[in-house]
Amino acid sequence: MPYSSRRKTRWSSGSDREARTATASQMESPDARPLIELNDVSLRFVNYSDKQHSLKRAVLDLVLRRESVAPKSEFWALRAINLKIHQGERVGIVGGNGAGKSTLLRMLARIYPPSSGRIEIRGNVAPLIEMGAGFNHELSGTDNIVFNGAMLGFSKSQMLARAQGIYEFTGLGEFAALPLKYYSSGMYMRLAFAIATEVHPDILLIDEALGVGDAAFLEKAKVRLRGLVERSKVVIIVSHDLGSLREFCNRGLWIQHGQLLADGPINDVIDQYLARTTAQAASA
């Protein structure tokens, strides 16, 4: 779906921060400032339902000076989100399907620009979102390690040096030369997870990355992920595995229908979320 953007939307980065006035810098030290800051951020999706609205029709409308009316509908995926996330926070996001959890992560990863409001991010971001999305199924496992490493900023030699460790972790060494199209879904996700966690970010975004592979591999994945979490300054996790969120996170956000309903200690937020969903299920 296409998105729409408004003039008042503002993105900021580390370079933007350096250009701020000395007065603003004196008011808040760099260590005290949040690494992520959202001010009244909203995201609107527009769906054009007229499938026959072509370029030819648009040109005719322009020549004939007639109003072009393409039936459309819109919905707000996120509404007026205000957040400040500081170094050391591990944030778990809960909510039902379609609540806007993953949309928020994609916005922080700069996949979606906000329709209104301002987002400011201080530090480099590593999104573990749709792992393996950049895989080429015709290439071997090793070729995909190199290719995905390049997208993460690593050179070919650096990724080849990491390949042995990746295969030891995944147990896929004997399939290194096999094209990915012959991998099972479990093998595919294990390789994607191992590559995606070869990063050292300031801000780590994780979307449902905790449910990879069988039970034995899941335990190995949690250990590896724990190390990555410890190296990151800020971690934000979206998952339906509430037990893992309680384990990894110290702060919780509850998003429903694109709005932030609760923000606080992770156990309190999860308990509120479960109480509401249980009550709704009982009354249905």
Image (cartoon, rainbow, N blue to C red):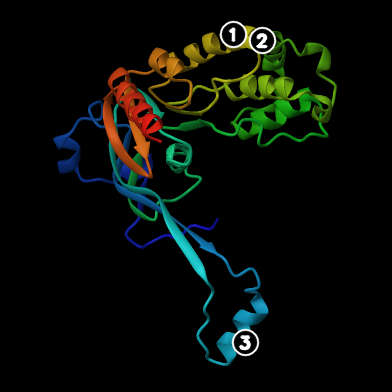
- What's the amino acid at mark 3? Leu
* Residue 156, quarter of the rendered image: top right
Dot 1: element: helix
Residue drawn at point x = 48 percent, y = 48 percent: 112
| Cα separation between marks 3 and 1 | 61 Å
> Which residue has dot 3 on it?
60
Q: Is residue 132 visible to the viewer in this orientation of the structure? A: yes
Residue at x 43% of width, y 37% of height = 101
Image height check: is 135 above or below 43? above
Q: Position of residue 200 (x, y in %)?
A: 50, 22
Q: Which residue is mark 1?
A: 220
- The answer to whether mark 2 and mark 1 are in CB contact below 8 A is yes
Q: Quadrant of the N terminus?
A: bottom right
| Rendered view: 42 above or below 242 | below
Label for residue 8? none
Q: Residue furthest front?
A: 283
Q: Which circle, 3 or 2, is nearer the viewer?
A: 3
